[in-house]
Image (cartoon, grey):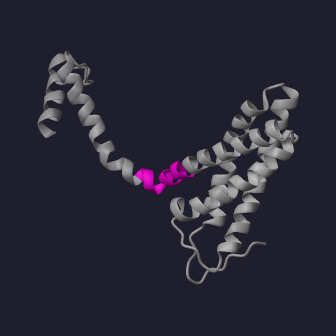
């Protein structure tokens, strides 16, 4: 790396003494420059990825995607085959999907074991999910009734909007890491 860096600095100085910026002459110069710029990212990104919880968010979104598929499948089945009004179908589909999501997120995303407070955390998860459901239903209703968008397409957009509310609420309340002497209550 040091050899490449010296090569770039020397070449840039030789090209124009007034301007020390790097202008690659050929493909090899450009590749060396890109390598020097990107190499530190290889070491920085894992800590950034971990520090800001992006790995958790990626897992949460993956589980949410599976839950959204379950939700859409149940919503479509109840609405089309059983002729249940789409908003009622969504509520039923929602509760089935969040139960799935809670179990998988607890074990895989937030790496918690089932303990005495599992039921309390499930209630917290439901509260956050109900807040997300409120956002979801509002967006679904507005897109379907006001903009005449097909309810399945509207649900996909509504799910995207409410996913951020769900992740932040669950990360910082439901699955918050607790100190040994700290007490968390629902209300």
The residue under the point 29% across, 35% down is: 37
In-image side of 175 versus 24 (left or right): right
- Residue 126 at x, y = what percent? 74, 61
In-image side of 89 versus 68 (left or right): right
- Residue 180 at x, y = what percent? 56, 82
Compared with 68, 152 (above or below) is above
Quarter containing the N terminus: top left
Residue 50 is a magenta residue: yes
In-image side of 143 versus 56 (left or right): right
Q: Nearer the viewer, residue 8 or 73?
A: 73
Compared with 172, 83 (above or below) is above
Start-end of magenta stretch: 48-60
The residue under the point 84% across, 39% down is: 86
Quarter containing the C terminus: bottom right
- Residue 10 at x, y = what percent? 14, 27
Q: Nearer the viewer, residue 141 or 51?
A: 141
């Amino acid at each position: 790396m040091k050899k490449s860096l010296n090569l770039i600095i020397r070449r840039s100085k030789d090209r124009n003494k007034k301007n020390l910026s790097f202008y690659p002459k050929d493909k090899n110069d450009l590749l060396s420059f890109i390598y020097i710029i990107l190499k530190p990212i290889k070491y920085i990104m894992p800590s950034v990825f971990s520090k800001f919880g992006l790995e958790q968010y990626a897992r949460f979104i993956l589980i949410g995607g599976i839950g959204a598929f379950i939700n859409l499948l149940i919503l479509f089945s109840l609405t089309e085959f059983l002729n249940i009004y789409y908003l009622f179908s969504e509520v039923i589909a929602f509760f089935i999907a969040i139960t799935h999501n809670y179990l998988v997120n607890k074990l895989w995303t937030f790496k918690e074991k089932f303990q005495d407070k599992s039921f309390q955390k499930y209630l917290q998860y439901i509260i956050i999910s109900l807040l997300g459901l409120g956002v979801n239903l509002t967006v679904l209703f507005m897109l379907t009734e006001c903009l005449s968008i097909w309810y399945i397409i509207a649900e996909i957009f509504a799910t995207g909007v409410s996913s951020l509310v769900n992740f932040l609420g669950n990360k910082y309340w439901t699955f918050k890491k607790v100190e040994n002497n700290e007490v968390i209550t629902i209300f």
